[in-house]
Amino acid sequence: MAAPSVATDRPVSGHVDAPRLQVFVLALFFIFGGITSLNDVIIPKLKELFTLSYTQAMLVQVCFFAAYAVIGIPAAKLVKRIGYMRGAVAGLALMMIGCLMFIPASSTATYGLFLAALFVLASGVVIVQVVANPLISMLGKPETTHSRLTFAQAFNSLGTTIFPYFGAILILGALASQSAGELSGAALDAYRTAGSQAIVNGYLGLAVALAVVAGVVWLFRNALPAEQHEASAGLAGLDLLGQRRFGFGALCIFLYVGAEVSIGSLIVNYLGQAQVMGLAEQQAGKLIGLYWGGAMVGRFVGSALLRLVAPGRMLALVAIGAIVLITVSTQSTGDVSGYSLLAIGLMNAIMFPTIFSLACEGLGPRAADGSGIINVAIVGGAVVPLLTGMIVDASGSLALGLALPAACYAVIASFGWFTARPAPAA
């Protein structure tokens, strides 16, 4: 997952250390990807600690991805005002504050405070993403934008592969011999405080790392002396939703992020079912990395294939592949069921950058406005998982809940075939 650009695809001008800048941007993709994927680890932990329904547990994703709708456009304006490098520092600092907010949340063992901390953390992530994507867009030729964005997101996926594995060891392994459902009164309160402390330890480590990265970035705050930004006011770009191609693409960003996040959020509980793999939380949590790792491998491979295959056609094929894998998973048992669900990550690989670039083709000087609106569409990561959780609670079936992500992929497949035709000029 990544937020779109907030600037046109003008190459960076002036005296710029391009290799160092590229490393810096790829590091940002790694950081915000890893932090986002940790939600898949803390959801089952908080669900168990606070004895939540699936709908209530999905509020983690609601609060995290709601930041894209609330902060997306203000973040773009902030970056335009203070510049890319200072914007990155601001985002990293806000992420650090969000991590530190887990301390009072743990000391009171209050679910609402955890949600508030996640919103602040996500707000910083949004700002960092607003910096990273336009820089990647400008570090090369326009005709290789599809490939370059996909390659950069492979580093995002590297973070989403590594973070859940170690997060599962640290967070899901704590107090594994007990369950909140077996306790009450003071014992339950103590269990929740101790269990949430495992979450805090992980995020405190992240806070320290973010502080170091922010300090390093600050040293290079003047690295882009000639960066330029287009001015925009209010909710500029809303009229673009009336353009069929752009509006369809924005909808697909909404659905894609929602589907990807919904599946990731259910992995631990899904693999823990007796008819699937019957894994303990920590074991299942370690396998989250395979879901996101598939996206990483697919993005490296996809960055090359997109130079040879029409982006729209490839998008349609991988979306259909995701539907097939969901069908196989829900209609089978054991390892086949579990690993076919995890393999959906491979199908997700090229979706975000390809949908984004296809939707914005032909916008010309209005690319900044269009990408700002698509940024808001990432709020699908809040809406679709919540609806998925409601379906699971109402039906009592995790398999039935996966029907909603499958429907999302069907719409994305149709967008792929639709964009096989050339985009109209702006």
Image (cartoon, helix red, strand yellow):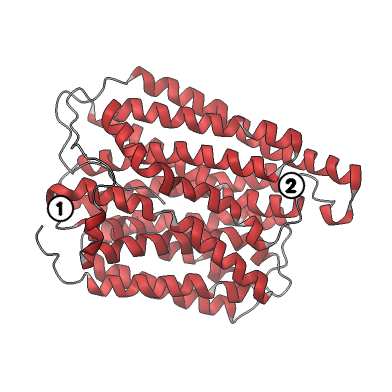
Q: Position of residue 173 (x, y in %)?
A: 74, 47
Q: The residue tagged with tag 1: helix, strand or loop?
A: helix
Q: Callout 2, which amino acid?
A: Gly
Res. 309 visible in picture: no
Residue 166 appears left or right of 130: right
Q: Position of residue 143 (x, y in %)?
A: 15, 52
Res. 30 visible in picture: yes
Residue 389 appears left or right of 34: right
Q: Position of residue 405 (x, y in %)?
A: 49, 69
- Determine which quarter of the picture holds residue 353: bottom left
Q: Is residue 148 positioned above or below 412 on the image?
A: above
Q: Are marks 1 and 2 in contact (CB under 8 Å)?
A: no
Residue on which disc 1 sits: 143
Residue 332: mark in rendering: none
Q: Position of residue 94 (x, y in %)?
A: 48, 31
Q: Which residue is at the far front?
A: 234
Q: Nearer the viewer, residue 43 or 166?
A: 43
Q: Earlier in the sequence, mark 1 or mark 2?
A: 1
Residue 279 appears left or right of 286: right
Q: CA distance from mark 1 to mark 2?
A: 47 Å
Q: Callout 1, which amino acid?
A: Glu
Q: Residues within 10 Å of mark 1 (few under 14, many from 20)?
A: few
Residue 173: mark in rendering: 2
- Determine which quarter of the picture holds residue 248: bottom left
- Residue drawn 39% across and 59% down? 349
Q: The residue tagged with tag 2: helix, strand or loop?
A: loop
